Image: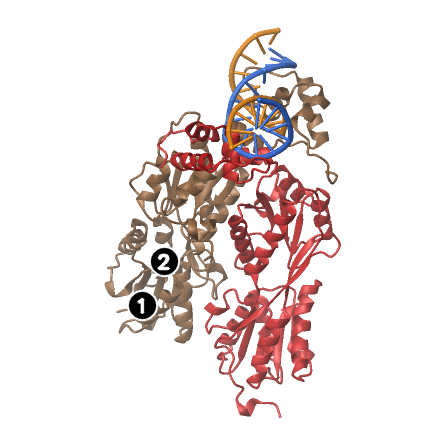
Chain colours: A red, B brown, C orange, D blue
DNA sequence: TTGTAAGCGTTATCAG
DNA sequence: CTGATAACGCTTACAA
């Protein structure tokens, strides 16, 4: 407990109290005296003095001396203003902050920059001005912005939807395992007419979800049916509603809907509600993301993305690169598997509705 | 654009290029030369040199010299892990970060600390170790934690649900204006049996919402009816559902429900859906918070809290206090008014259902 | 095994 | 009006 107005102790205070020099204090506390070893007695005296004074090294002075701020820039996929529209990047940001903290780093979100500063190239300037040690990019929009950061000398990690050009470490999620499990459960319960609602963006990640869906179906000898595939421009609630409406208008309705995002799934549920179609009795639903799928009514079976693992690998990779003495590093490309959590939103297809 | 490996320019580089001393550079760039004025020509030369080199002062060195980190600690009401359960504190956090950034400060969220560090008193240590300049507390749980921070010498601001003891500036929201407007609209459309679902916590803020509700009714000569008042332990979806069930079981149902939080209102909507009661045709609903009320189906009329204003006043007050040369300051107590946004969730009471 | 000294980049003070 | 100088607190090479 520090008294009001009490000066916070410095390494000099500790040194004096322990009867040693400041250098010793630094060496003991960082446990990194390469060329010199300290006698156990002295060592203990320093430790005690530091504890008694409640000394902690001033991170600002340390940063200045080490030429490392211990701050990591993070550029989210979308502004933090829209947590409800884009829950995945939002949650990813939370995990990144936690993982960084665990390792003694802090996160500076570049999206917190005032809009006036958000033009292309300004992000690099913003981060350079603040002397961040490295940058994590979630699904950068263009290769140019990535290249700008790399050329500025920052260690850079790309997540989820990397740009292929710039030579950076990338961490992505493999949709296959979770999707396979989801389809396996659906098929095991008699579903064959399974609709897909997903985003049709040009990025491989979006196409991949559909490709995995088709691959999983193929594994069970189910032929793809284009009428059951709905591609939307984005993963939002409204698109989920609209596409579900289209599916319900079909002559032969699906018995299950696979929504490639929790928000889409929420829209699906709303549309089904309004049409008086009960879930899972009259329609099974599976979502992708598993952010709030478990809190919906009914709780949805969902393909889960390993966001925490993505965050932890990202931080780990970046710190390794930052703390590399020379600029040495080789880009790594890591893919982490999805999982699947079964809940109550998939039911056996009633016999009379099974296709002949 | 900085070349890879290029050293980032320092004030010495600028000084050399402009043919002046480092002190001049500092003085010109900070535009704060009290005792000395600079000739326009020299001034311009410095500015030009800085611009040409792309010089920006190193914030780390500046922080060390000024003994001010330009980092503000923020202790949210709830962990950022739960944006969906507690949207208000979450959004408040976003606004705080933006407002801080506008003024050249950064936010360090103490909740990002690993759980191992979250015991009482550890928050103060956490913030002291990082040398934050001041602390903003959203609805602190106990007076003790506030006192600990104040006694540690931090400038402290309390938001929303301040603890009355410690002498800090506080910023709260006055529920009256928005609640009055909401009730006025309900009454104008013929509602008299208006139910209230809210939290019954011991904090004045929670009691205040109910008090304002009753005061607003009284203004229209409507007597309070205890059977229509539901107090729950927390503002969550499930409570909203449950309480609505209880209201629907009443012999004489209300014609409108005032839910003292968006999450409660969401639960109300779910319960009404399941009971087959259409909104607004058979039941009017008004929420409090207006975070996602406008995105629900149907969009709800809602009492809005001025979160952005709270954030901006908080940052302003804190920075004023931080930048005060001597420890001088007088605690201020600011109350900001709620507003009301009318949407389509309130309808005229059908004649046959009006009480006689 | 320990102490000394230099320097990280900035800014404030104080002579010139 | 301008320029040298010291100090912020820490770390690290090097000397003792």
Q: In the rendered structure, find residue B254 and report the number of the disc placed on it.
A: 1
Between residues A130 and A170, which one lies in front from this camera angle?
Answer: A170
Q: What is the crowding at mark 2: few (fewer than 14 residues within 10 Å), some, or many (at least 20)? A: many
Measuring from the top left, give residue B276's x and y in whole percent: 41, 76
Question: In the image, is residue A4 above or below residue B187?
Answer: above
Residue B74 visible, this orientation: yes
Q: Position of residue A228 (x, y in %)?
A: 65, 78
Q: Nearer the viewer, residue C11 or A210?
A: C11
**B161 with respect to B341 (left or right):** left
Which of A247 and A340 lies nearest the eye of the viewer? A340
Host chain of mark 2: B
Q: Is residue A261 left or right of residue B160?
A: right
Above or below, comparing residue A160 to residue A25 in the picture: below
Of mark 2 and mark 1, the one earlier in the sequence is 1
Point out which mark residue B309 bears: none
Quadrant that contains the N terminus of chain A: top left
Q: Please give the name of the residue rendered at 63% of the width and 40% of the height, measured from the top-left corner.
A: A126
Which labelled disc corresponds to residue B260? 2
- Of badges 2 and 1, the one in the foreground is 2
Chain ID at mark 1: B
Question: Residue A34 placed where, x, y %?
Answer: 59, 38
Secondary structure beneath label 2 = loop
Residue B187 found in image quarter:
bottom left
Query: Could you say which is closer to the camera, residue B345 or residue A215?
Result: A215
Residue A91: x, y in percent?
Answer: 53, 57
């Amino acid at each position: 407990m520090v008294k009001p107005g009490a000066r916070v102790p410095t390494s000099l205070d500790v040194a004096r109290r322990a009867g040693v020099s400041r250098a010793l204090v630094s060496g003991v506390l960082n446990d990194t005296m390469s060329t010199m070893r300290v006698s156990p007695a002295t060592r203990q005296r320093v430790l005690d003095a530091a504890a008694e004074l409640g000394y902690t090294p001033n991170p600002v002075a340390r940063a200045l001396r080490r030429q490392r701020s211990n701050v990591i820039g993070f550029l989210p996929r979308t502004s933090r203003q829209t947590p409800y529209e884009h829950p995945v990047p939002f949650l990813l940001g939370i995990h990144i902050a936690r993982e960084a903290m665990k390792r003694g780093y802090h996160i500076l979100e570049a999206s917190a920059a005032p809009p006036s500063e958000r033009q292309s190239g300004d992000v690099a300037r913003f981060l350079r001005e603040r002397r961040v040690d490295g940058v994590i990019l979630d699904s950068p929009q263009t290769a140019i912005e990535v290249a700008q950061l790399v050329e500025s000398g920052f260690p850079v990690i790309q997540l989820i939807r990397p740009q292929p050009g710039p030579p950076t470490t990338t961490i992505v999620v493999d949709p296959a395992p979770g999707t396979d499990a989801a389809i396996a459960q659906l098929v095991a319960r008699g579903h064959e007419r399974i609709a897909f609602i997903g985003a049709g963006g040009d990025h491989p990640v979006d196409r991949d979800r559909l490709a995995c869906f088709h691959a999983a179906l193929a594994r069970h000898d189910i032929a793809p049916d284009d009428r059951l595939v709905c591609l939307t421009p984005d993963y939002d609630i409204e698109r989920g509603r609209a596409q579900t409406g289209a599916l319900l208008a079909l002559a032969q309705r699906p018995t299950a809907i696979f929504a490639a995002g929790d928000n889409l799934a929420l829209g699906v549920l709303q549309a089904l509600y309004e049409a008086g179609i009960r879930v899972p009795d009259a329609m099974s639903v599976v979502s992708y993301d598993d952010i709030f799928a478990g809190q919906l009514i009914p709780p949805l079976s969902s393909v889960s993305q390993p966001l925490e693992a993505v965050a932890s690998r990202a931080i780990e990779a970046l710190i390794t690169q930052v703390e590399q003495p020379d600029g040495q590093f080789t880009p790594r490309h890591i893919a982490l598997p999805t999982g699947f959590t079964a809940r109550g939103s998939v039911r056996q297809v009633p016999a009379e509705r099974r296709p002949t």
